[in-house]
Amino acid sequence: MLFWSQGATLVMPFASLELMAVGLAFVVYARHATDGERISLQEGQLVVEWESAGKLERAEFQRDWVRVEPRAGDGSLIELSGRGRTIQVGRFIRPELRPLLAREIRLALRAA
């Protein structure tokens, strides 16, 4: 109010606009703060659950029918496919670690 009384009438509207922009940024961040993927073996099935912006999705593959791609270390997303369904995983890890994740999934599928 001090600035308003001294003639700077646009300070308060712009300060309010800035606070609304910061509030909106927090809302957008909060929507994606819990995003992630979970990959597990349960009762002979490879179960993949991923959450994005509060929406939870789940895919299940028979352990014996899952194909894990790519085999090369190019850092692309890992493609899991089986029985007509294909999904991609590995969005939340660094590209150079994706081949390691693919190898761990393959080893877990063989060992189970």
Image: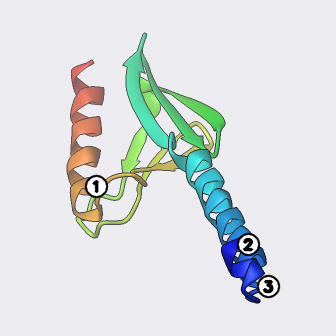
- Chain-order first, disc 1 or disc 3: 3
Q: CA distance from mark 2 to mark 3?
A: 14 Å
Q: Nearer the viewer, residue 6 or 26?
A: 6
Residue appearing at x 78%, y 76% in the figure: 13
Q: Residues within 10 Å of mark 2 (few under 14, many from 20)?
A: few
**Disc 1: which residue:** 98
Left/right placement of residue 18 relative to residue 104 reads right
- Chain-order first, disc 2 or disc 3: 3
> What SS does tag 2 mark?
helix
Q: Of the residues tagged 2 and 3, which is closer to the observer?
A: 3
Residue appearing at x 68%, y 74% in the figure: 2
Q: Of the residues tagged 1 and 3, which is closer to the observer?
A: 3
- The amino acid beneath tag 3 is Thr
List x then y, in percent, for residue 48: 49, 32
- The amino acid beneath tag 2 is Leu
Q: Nearer the viewer, residue 108 or 101?
A: 101
Quarter in which the C terminus is drawn: top left
- The amino acid beneath tag 1 is Arg
List x then y, in percent, for residue 84: 62, 42
Toward the top, the furthest residue is: 43
Q: CA distance from mark 1 to mark 3?
A: 55 Å
**Disc 3: which residue:** 9
Q: Is residue 48 above or below residue 41?
A: below
Left/right placement of residue 26 relative to residue 71 reads right
Residue appearing at x 63%, y 46% in the figure: 53
List x then y, in percent, for residue 31: 62, 47
**Disc 2: which residue:** 17
Residue appearing at x 28%, y 59% in the figure: 94
Toward the bottom, the furthest residue is: 7
Q: Nearer the viewer, residue 84 or 11?
A: 11
Q: Is residue 81 above or below residue 76?
A: above
